[in-house]
């Protein structure tokens, strides 16, 4: 076991750490065998950490079998520790290979005379229900223990029954009547009934089972009107409906009925809580009557806490499809104004409520109505929403309490949403934000700055008006001494960078640097420099990176900052480009390339094995190649000026039948230049493909970074299209696929400017093609060079993923069989197939699924013949190679599958297993990793004997003739 564990983990890519896995397991095993109870307990509770570090089945199986032994022979405290470890490691249970042996060792304790031991065993079985859902002996033990006279055992049986009911339809059908009898039986204590009722939420495996459970719950809620009983029964009712789906409308009506008619506040609170659950899960099942009833209850209740709960449900519904149904299905909706609806009346009444939470939900409802129902005339509602938001802003910005800050965040989110869908309201919203910034508390200023930045990025026309206010506030913050000073400086600097869209003036740069020198630490300066790089203010970023170079303690950090400084300097060189000044453009690009080459050397030095900076290196290398391609294109366009007028060239080209020679006279020079143009077009297409590969490999990147990569790819495609349309093949060039989709979804100023350049270049190329056919060489050159300069004049944005990785996802693969030494090949006879088992574990960082989640993993297995041995035979082409692909869905971050591979040709074969992931939208991401093993295909003994006999001149026997090497294939 230890040897196989070692080879398994070695192949999983752990390198030296496979020894650590085995030694850690042996160390824990030593603790388990200790005679001291404390050491045994310590060993048991350290197992979850071992599972987290080495999550492959071979180690987990061995570890759980050891724990099962401890459970079998240990005392109750040790059993309790094993139970806790099992519950913590629930996601690893399915990796147990010897399930029967594991269950056998645990189950032996169920026959103990100690009811506590039996109770712990029942809880253990319940925790393992996901891997043994149909074990009849477990089912029987649970049913038997429900009749026990020991309360501890009965409670454990209830826990196990709930878990098995969720996993097994047979168990749920069999136990339903038993649970029903116990709940309705007079001998069962009330507190036990309260624990039994929640089991019924799992009776949703088929319609008849759900219906009978629902009828039982209906009887209970009528027969037992006590507060606790009604609360438990109603909540179980809701969870059952949410799982079975068909009864949700009935459940909504039942909850609304209790909310309206039951006088007990506890029952009303439970009804509100369950309505919120159903509003989140199935908003489309809410009818207009349901929403109307909830509005009436909210209007009539005198209790603020209940009103806030109801408004919370309504604000959730107002952001979904339910709100459109509410307005569209109203009787006489066409003639009714929006103000006459009860929902609107309620929201307007609550906007200025003295309770902040109620007011926040009121303005949120109005904002969602304004955003969702844009086809209606809602001008009065918009004004109400703006006034309500401004009132809340004034109230919450003066208060430092956590409740006020939570309300402020809701308010600011609503402001951004309202401005996005109703741009004409933006001026008043921005003015109120700027007015409050000066008097607000520091805790409130930070989210207010974020809100201003979000609005300015959506509507850049508002940005210029902010600068004066912001600079005054920046000076004020720099001179103050508050706890939030560093965070405020970063937030304000971000808004200033967004507001000054073109370039920072000298005055602004001086003020920012002055305040940083006086008041900030190095980390604040780095964050501000990072924001400057994201917003394209590279001159400011370069100066800040330069000032930080001597303030870091590690040479890796030094090289990282030095590379950022060089990249910023390179991009700053490109800001001086001018149209129609091609020689200066070439010198600017050359200067930028010089800095980029210095930067990429520093960036490589900054990378470490744990942090290889692969995205950063890939992005910068592509930028260098793109600049070189632009430079080459401008040089080629300048060279084309030596060609004769196009009319002569076209005539001669037509007589010779060579379209490429249309660009110049029939000479080696003209042909060479035309080929250079074709080569340039292919180079831009190749760059576009490489940008696409970088996009596909960046599974963990945020959407803004991915959009940035996409824009670089589109700029390459644009130039290649322009070369084809103007010079190489104007007749067949199509403008349809490159037409702009508009700028409705533009998220940043960088994207806005790039889209503007794309549209302008496409219009120029299309107009030249329509007006002058064929296009003159001078017009073509001018158009191409101006397109390159226009693209380079937009300052490059280094997005978040270049600096910061918020989501981290990686896959570890393990192949079996695997050799003890990675360089050794696995021996396989050529008349047999190799069963290759591929197992993998998906590992996440601190925020799994922040941007996208893994739906399935695509495994691609291919083999290549490296060296051939033996004679050449005529073999079908299908047997020459192995190329297979399988998709598997990870369960609890683990997946496993098998491939059957043929190795008919004798020799050494190289097997490569590569993984990629598919997200929930069906997009394939080439995340890797790629694992390689070697296989040596050997001749089978029968074929070898036949061949030797033939070489010696002996005729093979009849039996041997039938068993030749390739007869099976």
Image (cartoon, rainbow, N blue to C red):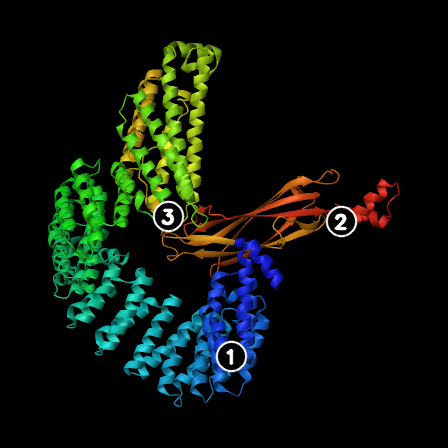
Asked if residue 357 is positioned above or below residue 870 in the image, the reply reads below
Q: Write the residue at 76% across / 46% down.
A: 965
Between discs 3 and 1, the one toward the N terminus: 1
Of labels 3 and 1, the one closer to you: 3
Q: Position of residue 203 (x, y in %)?
A: 43, 73
The part of the image, by quadrant, that contains residue 955 is top right
The part of the image, by quadrant, that contains residue 835 is bottom right
Of labels 1 and 2, the one closer to you: 1
Of labels 2 and 3, the one closer to you: 3
Q: Seen from this angle, which residue lies furthest right?
A: 954
Q: Closer to the camera, 33 or 411?
A: 33
Q: Secondary structure at mark 3?
A: loop
Between discs 1 and 2, the one toward the N terminus: 1
Q: Write the residue at 88% across / 40% down.
A: 953
Label 1 packing within 10 angstroms: few (<14), some (14-19), many (20+): few
Determine whether label 1 and label 2 are within 8 Å by CB.
Answer: no
Q: Which mark is residue 531?
A: none
Mark 2 → mark 3, Cα distance in angstroms: 59 Å
Asked if residue 664 is positioned above or below residue 939 in the image, the reply reads above
Residue hosting label 3: 554
Residue hosting label 2: 940
Q: Which mark is residue 36?
A: 1
The part of the image, by quadrant, that contains residue 660 is top left
Q: Write the residue at 22% across / 35% down.
A: 503
């Amino acid at each position: 076991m230890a040897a196989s564990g070692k080879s398994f983990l070695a192949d999983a890519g752990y390198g030296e750490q496979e020894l650590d896995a085995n030694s850690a397991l042996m160390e824990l095993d030593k603790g388990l065998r200790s005679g001291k109870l404390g050491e045994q307990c310590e060993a048991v509770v350290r197992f979850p950490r071992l599972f987290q570090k080495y999550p492959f089945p071979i180690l987990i199986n061995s570890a759980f079998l050891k724990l099962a032994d401890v459970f079998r022979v240990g005392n109750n405290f040790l059993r309790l520790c094993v139970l806790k470890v099992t519950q913590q490691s629930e996601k690893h249970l399915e990796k147990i290979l010897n399930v029967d042996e594991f269950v056998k060792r645990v189950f032996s304790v169920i026959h103990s005379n100690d009811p506590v031991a039996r109770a712990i065993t029942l809880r253990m079985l319940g925790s393992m229900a996901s891997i043994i859902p149909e074990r009849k002996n477990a089912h029987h033990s649970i049913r038997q223990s429900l009749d026990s006279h020991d309360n501890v055992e009965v409670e454990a049986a209830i826990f196990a029954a709930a878990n098995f009911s969720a996993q097994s339809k047979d168990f749920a059908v069999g136990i339903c009547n038993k649970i029903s009898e116990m709940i309705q039986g007079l001998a069962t204590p009330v507190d036990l009934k309260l624990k039994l009722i929640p089991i019924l939420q799992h009776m949703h495996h088929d319609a008849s089972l759900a219906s009978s459970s629902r009828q039982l719950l209906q009887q209970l809620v009528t027969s037992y009107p006590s507060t606790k009983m009604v609360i438990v029964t109603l909540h179980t009712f809701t969870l059952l409906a949410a799982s079975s789906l068909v009864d949700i409308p009935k459940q909504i009506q039942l909850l609304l009925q209790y909310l309206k008619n039951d006088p007990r506040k506890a029952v009303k609170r439970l009804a509100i809580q369950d309505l919120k659950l159903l509003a989140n899960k199935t908003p489309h099942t809410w009818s207009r009557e349901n929403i109307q009833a909830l509005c009436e209850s909210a209007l009539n209740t005198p209790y603020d806490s209940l009103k806030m709960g109801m408004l919370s449900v309504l604000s959730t519904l107002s952001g979904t499809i339910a709100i459109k149904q509410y307005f569209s299905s109203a009787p006489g909706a066409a003639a009714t104004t929006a103000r006459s609806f009860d929902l609107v009346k309620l929201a307007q009444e609550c906007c200025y409520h003295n309770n902040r939470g109620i007011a926040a939900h009121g303005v949120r409802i109005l904002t969602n109505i304004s955003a969702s129902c844009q086809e209606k005339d809602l001008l009065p509602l918009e004004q109400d929403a703006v006034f309500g938001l401004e009132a809340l802003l004034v109230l919450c910005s003066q208060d430092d309490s956590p409740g006020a800050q939570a309300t402020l965040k809701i308010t600011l989110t609503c402001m951004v949403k309202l401005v996005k869908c109703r741009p004409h309201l933006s001026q008043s919203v921005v003015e109120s934000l700027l007015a409050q910034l000066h008097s607000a508390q520091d805790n409130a200023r930070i989210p207010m700055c974020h809100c201003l930045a979000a609005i300015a990025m959506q509507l850049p026309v508002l940005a210029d008006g902010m600068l004066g206010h912001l600079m005054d506030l920046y000076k004020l913050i720099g001179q103050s001494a508050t706890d939030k000073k560093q965070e405020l400086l970063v937030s304000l600097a971000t808004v200033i960078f967004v507001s000054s869209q073109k370039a920072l003036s000298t005055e602004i740069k001086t003020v920012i640097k002055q305040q940083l020198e006086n008041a900030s630490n190095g980390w604040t300066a780095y964050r501000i420099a990072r924001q400057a790089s994201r917003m394209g203010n590279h001159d400011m970023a370069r100066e800040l990176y330069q000032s930080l170079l001597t303030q870091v303690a590690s040479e890796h950090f030094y090289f990282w900052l030095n590379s950022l400084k060089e990249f910023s300097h390179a991009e700053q060189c490109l800001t001086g480009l001018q149209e129609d000044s091609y020689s200066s453009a070439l010198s600017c690009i050359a200067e930028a390339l010089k800095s980029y080459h210095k930067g990429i050397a520093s960036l490589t030095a900054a990378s470490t094995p744990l942090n290889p900076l692969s995205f950063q290196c890939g992005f910068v290398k592509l930028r260098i190649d793109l600049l070189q391609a632009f430079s080459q294109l401008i040089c080629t366009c300048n060279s084309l000026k030596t060609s004769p007028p196009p009319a002569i060239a076209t005539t001669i080209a037509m007589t010779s039948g060579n379209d490429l020679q249309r660009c110049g006279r029939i000479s080696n020079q003209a042909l060479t230049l035309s080929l250079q143009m074709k080569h340039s077009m292919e180079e831009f297409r190749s760059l576009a493909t490489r940008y696409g590969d970088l996009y596909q490999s960046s599974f963990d990147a945020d959407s803004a970074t991915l959009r940035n990569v996409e824009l670089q790819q589109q700029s390459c495609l644009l130039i290649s299209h322009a070369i084809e349309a103007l010079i190489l093949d104007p007749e067949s060039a199509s403008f349809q696929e490159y037409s702009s989709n508009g700028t409705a979804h533009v998220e940043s100023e960088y994207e806005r400017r790039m889209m503007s350049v794309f549209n302008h270049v496409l219009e120029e190329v299309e107009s030249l093609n329509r007006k002058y056919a064929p296009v003159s060489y001078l017009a073509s050159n001018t158009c191409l060079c101006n397109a390159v300069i226009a693209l380079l004049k937009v300052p490059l944005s280094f997005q978040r993923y270049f600096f910061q990785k918020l989501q981290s996802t990686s896959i570890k693969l393990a192949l079996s069989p695997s050799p003890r030494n990675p360089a050794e090949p696995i021996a396989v006879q050529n008349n047999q197939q190799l069963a290759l088992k591929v197992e993998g574990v998906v590992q996440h960082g601190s925020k799994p699924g922040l941007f996208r989640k893994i739906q399935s993993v695509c495994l691609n297995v291919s083999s290549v013949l490296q060296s051939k041995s033996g004679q050449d035979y005529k073999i079908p082409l299908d047997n020459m190679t192995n190329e297979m692909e399988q998709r598997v869905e990870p369960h609890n971050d683990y997946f496993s599958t098998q491939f059957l591979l043929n190795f008919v040709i004798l020799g050494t074969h190289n097997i490569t297993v590569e993984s990629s992931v598919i997200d929930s939208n069906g997009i394939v991401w080439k995340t890797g990793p790629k694992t390689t093993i070697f296989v040596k295909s050997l001749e089978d003994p029968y074929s070898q004997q036949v061949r030797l006999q033939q070489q010696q001149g002996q005729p093979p026997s009849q039996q041997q003739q039938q068993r030749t090497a390739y007869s099976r294939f």
